[in-house]
Image (cartoon, rainbow, N blue to C red):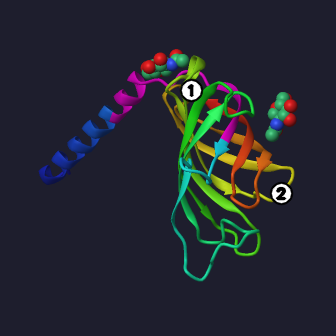
Amino acid sequence: MGTPPSLLLPLAVLLAAAAVSLQTGATAPLGKEKTTQLHFFLHDTLSGKDPSAVLIGRNALHAPRPDDPTPFSSVYAADDVLTEGPERQSRVVGNAQGIYVSSGKGQLSLVLGMDFELTDGPFNGSAFVVYSRNTVTRPVGRELAVVGGRGRFRMARGYALLRTHFLDNNNGDAIIEYNVTLLHH
Ligand SMILES: *[C@@H]1O[C@H](CO)[C@@H](O)[C@H](O)[C@H]1NC(C)=O
Ligand SMILES: *[C@@H]1O[C@H](CO)[C@@H](O)[C@H](O)[C@H]1NC(C)=O
């Protein structure tokens, strides 16, 4: 018994779709995976007339205190400068844009969703993306997950090791050292 004609057309459509997706894969190769190390300092400035991070909102039950300027539930929008050295006057190498939320009820902890774009050097215009918890008060072993990338960092995954270079506990201003290891195509 042959296949009923009513089943032939859907099958033909399915086969055509499969052929198209196979072809797309073959014509856009990703190339070899590479490893890139980046080192820079991030300036997160909450104080002054031109802050790089501003409060979007916070729950009314969690008011800021002098020793806790970013209480649980605070959400910030950030456009933080990345520099080569720890000083603000040091060469600018990029910026990190996104949001972070104060997510620790008992102890200060931030969850960052940020896009780090480089504006200098061989990776100018490329970016890696972090979505991760930042255990701010932990003195060592702070690590963020890199979950993606753009441009030359396409398909990036990796991690960033963080160390606080400077922190003002009263206004929240911080300079953070980043060592980033990226696997990308
Ligand atoms: C980075 O790329 C932008 C856009 O193409 C360009 O305007 C800028 O001059 C470049 N910067 C450096 C330092 O190469
Ligand atoms: C980053 O790497 C440099 C060079 O290996 C090292 O001196 C520095 O302590 C590292 N910093 C962090 C936060 O891992």
Amino acid type of disc 1?
His
Which residue of the protein is positioned furthest toward the bottom in this rendering? 61
Q: Residue furthest right?
A: 140
- Which residue shows up at 61% across the image and 27% down it? 93
Label 2 C-beta lies within 8 Å of the nearest ligand 2 atom: no
Q: Position of residue 109 (x, y in %)?
A: 71, 63
Residues packed near mark 2 inside 10 Å, few (<14), some (14 to 19) or many (20 plus): few
Rendered location of residue 35, percent (x, y): 68, 26
Residue named by callout 2: 138
The quadrant holding residue 121 is: top right
Which segment did they paint magenta?
21-42
Residue 36 visible within the image? yes
* In this picture, residue 8 sits left or right of residue 62: left
Query: Judging from the image, what secondary structure is the residue with disc 2 in?
Result: loop
Q: How many marks?
A: 2
User: Percent from the top left, x then y, of residue 99?
Assistant: 53, 54
**Residue located farthest toward the front when viewing the structure as drawn:** 49
Query: Does residue 2 appear in this view?
Result: no
Residue lying at 76% horizontally and 44% vertically, measured from the top left: 162
Q: Is residue 4 above or below residue 119?
A: below
Nearest the viewer among 145 and 167 is 167
* Residue 108, placed above or below residue 177: below
Are circles 1 and 2 on residues that touch, CB within 8 Å? no
Find the distance from the CA under tag 1 to the CA under tag 2. Answer: 32 Å
Q: Which residue is mark 1?
A: 185
Identify which residue is drawn at 35% across, 35% down.
21
Circle 1 crowding by C-alpha within 10 Å: few under 14, some 14–19, many from 20: some
The quadrant of the picture occupied by the C terminus is top right
